[in-house]
Amino acid sequence: MPKQAIIPPGTSAPIAPYVPGTLADGVLYVSGTLPFDKDNNVVHVGDAAAQTRHVLETIKGVVEAAGGTMDDVTFNQIFIRDWADYAKINTVYAEYFPGVKPARYCVQVGLVKPDALVEIATFAHVGKKA
């Protein structure tokens, strides 16, 4: 099956061998997205809500670069460092998905950089074939 790398304008080099998104047969797979700036430094240290907003804005950019909107998101995988941040993360998350919510799961894990509090990976059906 043909696939297309989705790399929004202004995207910096990733810290590992991956692309921000891959589009195949109308399905967009957005890589795990951390709260990084253009130099792969963690932003909003200690603020789970601000980190979540940053992550979801980054994901939104990948989805839009693939021709979709956040309404096209069908599944999210959420990784959090501390359950104490769960409510803050959910409050911001609900702003990005105000209508019918995507399916999702959330687990507590250690993240690639200690100051990162949240990481989200996303699937979206954008209806565009690669």
Image: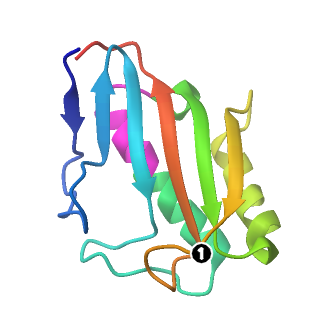
Q: Is residue 66 visible?
A: no
Identify the amino acid type marked 1.
Leu
> For numbered disc 1, what is the local secondary structure?
loop
Q: Position of residue 7 (x, y in %)?
A: 22, 44
Our reading of the magenta stretch's main secondary structure is helix
Q: Position of residue 33 (x, y in %)?
A: 44, 57
Position of residue 126 in the picture relative to residue 8 (left or right): right
Q: Is residue 67 visible?
A: yes
Quarter-of-image position of residue 37? bottom left
Q: Position of residue 105 (x, y in %)?
A: 70, 45
Quarter-of-image position of residue 2? top left
Q: Is residue 63 magenta?
A: yes
Q: Position of residue 51 (x, y in %)?
A: 55, 70
When the figure is inspected, residue 108 is found, relative to residue 113, above or below; the finding is above
Position of residue 72 in the picture relative to residue 31 (left or right): right
Q: Is residue 61 magenta?
A: yes
Write the start and end of the magenta stretch as one range.
Answer: 59-68
Q: Is 102 in front, or is 3?
A: 3
Identified at 30% across, 75% down, the residue is 40
The total of numbered circles placed on residues is 1
Residue tagged 1: 117
